[in-house]
Image (tube, rainbow, N blue to C red):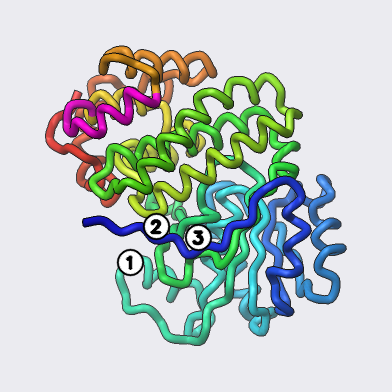
Amino acid sequence: MWHYRNPVDIHAGRGTLAQLPALLQGRRALVITFPEAVALGLDARLRALLGDRLAAVETGVQPNPDVSWLAPMYERLWRDHADVDCIIALGGGSVIDCAKSMLAPTPSGTFAELLALLAGATAPDAGRPRALIAIPTTAGTGSEVTPWATLWDQAQSRKHSLHQPWSWPEAAIVDADLMLSLPRGSTLASGLDALSHALESLWNVHRNPVSASLAVSAAREIIATLPLLLAQLDNVALRERMAVAALQAGLAFSNTKTALAHSLSYDLTLEHGVVHGIACSFSLPRVMALAMGADEALDALLLRIFDADSTDAAIDRLTRFLEGLGVSTDPGSYGLDEAEWPQRVDQALQGPRGRNFITTGATR
């Protein structure tokens, strides 16, 4: 028995940003976006599209949303715009995750109550949450079709995962035209994040036939497209191919969650500042080596992705793919001692995402 569900209303294809006013259905909206959106002209486009339906634009989002600046933003936006029914998140994963943390009111109007919810407190009942329309400007995060938001507390060396019924986006607009300005480094990191989502949803105890089909299609397309795109960043056809593949990967792991590679990545980001897309992808060959042999169906899917006839050939192709993009698969490149790797894996397997991994116990 298995179950697949995703409630997000998806609008995809070049030019679909124009559908935004209709998706608002007469509601007023608050836009949350990234600082560069103004210089890129995205801020002006949204203002022109939304007219008097636009309540305000918030551009203060930084990478890896941290409670140190999320808290004052949350309290200010709920104080000044409590009557706004909808948030539009335009940007990458950090922007969409930030927006998710702004959706639900708390009784006191403070962010501390929301953090208590993340720590296991009873959900505060302080009114109806806002709707979210997510518009990704990167091909990788998947946050536009998942209910999760990763929030960081650098001062306490902690990561929080927000996941509530109201944190699913109501709708997503996936328009590759919005991704043309993405620089090489961000294109690489977001693309590898999407690859990790696809693979992590396969070597996963929650895998189902729908998620597997989406993941295999996504992984094959990313492997074929990402190297081409990195050599032609202004190629909108390649941007669209990556956008669709990243969307498929997001739809896949929206039902399975991620697994061991993501569990390993969080401490790397906290301790060493490794960009998320790299932190969760450099270890993929090692994690795949642990997964292979656990399930014949999984092995067949992975061999298909890499057009390989053996485990070693598949792992080698994935390693060469990453190394060919300039991404080292050596933990030492990220400040880790090879000797501590088995212990890192054991610890990661005990985490919430690590427990989704298809096999446990063995390390290498």
Classify residue 315 by image quadrant: top left
Residue range (magenta): 292-305
What kind of residue is marked 2?
His
Mark 3 crowd level (few <14, some 14–19, many ≥20, 10 Å Cα): many
Q: Are marks 3 and 2 in contact (CB under 8 Å)?
A: yes
Q: Which residue is mark 1?
A: 119
Q: Give the percent coordinates (x, y) of residue 310.
A: 26, 15
Q: Are marks 3 and 1 in contact (CB under 8 Å)?
A: no
Q: Residue at horizontal 20%, vertical 46%?
A: 350
Q: CA separation, marks 1 and 2? A: 8 Å
Whether residue 268 appears in this view of the structure is no
Q: Position of residue 345 (x, y in %)?
A: 24, 33
Q: Amino acid at mark 1?
A: Ala
Picture coordinates of residue 357, whole percent (x, y):
24, 41
Viewer-closest of 69 and 207: 207
- Marks 3 and 2 sit apart, C-alpha to C-alpha, by 10 Å
Earlier in the chain: of badge 1 and badge 2, it is 1
Q: Which mark is residue 160?
A: 2
SS at badge 3: helix
Amino acid at the residue labelled 3 = Val
Whether residue 138 is visible here, answered yes or no, is: yes
Q: Residue at x 62, y 42 (%)?
A: 138
Foreground residue among 340 and 135: 135
